[in-house]
Image (cartoon, rainbow, N blue to C red):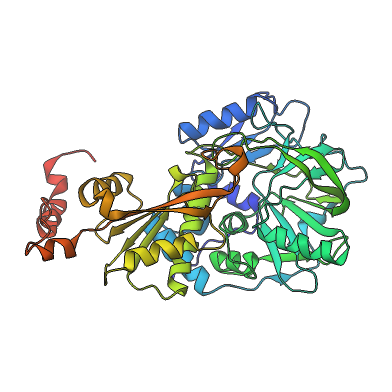
Amino acid sequence: MTQRRMFEDLRSFMDALHEAGELQDVRASVDKDWELGAICRETQDRVGPALVFRNISGHRTPLVTNVLGTVARYALALDVPPNIRDIQAHWKSALLNPVKPVVVSDAPCKQVKLEEIDLARDPFPVPLWHPLDHRPALGTFHAVITREPGSDWLNVGMYRNLVYGKDVLGCSIQATRHIARHWRAWKALGKPMPIAIAVGLDPYLILTGVSSIPAEHSEYEVAGGLKGAPIQLVQAETSDLLVPANAEMILEGEISLDETIPQEGPFGEFAGYQGLEKYNAPLMHVRTVTHRRDPYFQGTLEGRAPNESTIVRGIGRSMIVYDHLRRCGMPGIVDVCVTPGGCAQFHCVVSIEKIYEGQVREIMGLVWGQPDMYVKHVVVVDQDIDPWDPAKVEWAIATRVQASRDVEILRSGSTAKLDASQVPSLRGITDLMGIDATKPILQYQQEGREFPPLADPTSEDLERVRQRWAEYGIRG
């Protein structure tokens, strides 16, 4: 049996990307406050490689981005063939077989301790990712680590961190996120909340940090399941938090009880628009910074699809919805796609084996009720439709749906406050729409008819053609 390839840190994954021809150095001088974001946007639109910016004006520290920006690179991280099916199988195994982390004493992330913290200087080439951003954003592809007081539950998530001073960061805390639950508990105790930010991570921590792992479940353990071995952690310098031992850098501090940022944001967000500003937002004082020798800074350009973020969040969140439906005991679930074009959040397609009437509506309700997601629109299709194929999903909607019969609209849902379809005064509230794009078998039976058969070659004929494909001399 071939041993699975594992990556202990960002650097080893970068080596693998380089070997695969998926990583490119940019050695031309680049301005981080207008040019870098534009280069990333153009690269993502061209489905280009991972990038290492080696010559950012005013900085020696290189910046790494787009390392997981394609399905092929995502698959390389998991050491599986480059297709959604093998990625899904690996995720299913990881969710069923999480691996507990191990705590080590010798950690590369502590090789250097900064004597003076200045988030505008090396090792922090923090970009102004979008031209209308309020401040440079340190946190776009990182891990924010907090602990619920009196509990073993560590949350590892990605929350935006804009730079507001030499040692001051904002921390975007939405009321429904797990970090907000921790923050409410610390405030109830009348204590500031310890917090750590890890930058420059192995791919497994990135994949789990954005995937809406359920509350009180461990991102570290699911990451270990994806890796197939324990994630190495180390004790933080200033708190009881456990941080990734092989990260490029660790920032430690606390969320203040009585200080806030008068205005936090706007920032160019995952939905592809400038997110709204927040007022009197939580403030993080950075007390300690440690890093590896000659570190890399890592980030990603948020915004509209296609981009690295929608690839990573879409696949992981699809698996979390699939697992949620499985845990709820819903039969007949074949596949789930939280679509990249739906911002890897708002649109979900569920493929099913339809077993009973009412099943489709029950699935819609369960998806809307998943507590860590903000799905607005649910499309349910038959098992002959690949939910990852937009053309086939659209075909199912076009040929199997009657709006008065198959479309459900609810006017009482909740959504992310970054959803620009809603006016500012109503942000966080949304209509929910479900589309039953399965075959109307019952309605046909009531008329004594059968739903029309597919106008496709038989599977046997297609297989015979595939076996002779080379003889035809047709490219592709």
Residue 2 visible in image: no
Q: Which residue is drawn at 48% across and 51% down?
A: 314
4 or 213: nearer the eye?
A: 213
Residue 257 picture location, percent across and down = 87, 54
Residue found 76% across the figure and 68% down from its top: 104
Left or right of 433: which side holds 185?
Answer: right
Q: Can you give x and y, in whole percent of width and height, for residue 142 in the image? A: 67, 50
Q: Is residue 312 left or right of residue 239?
A: left
Q: Position of residue 270 (x, y in %)?
A: 57, 42
Q: Quadrant of residue 202?
A: bottom right
Whether residue 406 is situated above or below residue 262 in the rendered picture: below
Which residue occupies the extreme left position in the image? 448
Q: How far from the left and from the top, in percent, is residue 283?
A: 82, 47
Which residue is at a point 86% across and 48% down the rendered structure image?
Answer: 285
Q: In which quarter of the image is the C terminus?
A: top left
Q: Which of 392 and 469 is in front in this view?
A: 392
Image mark count: 0
Which residue extends farthest right?
A: 115
Is residue 434 among the parts visible in the rendering?
yes
The correct choice, above or below, for 270 with respect to 415 in the image is above
Q: Which of the image's four quarters has the N terminus?
A: bottom left
Look at the picture and state if 286 lies above or below 211: above
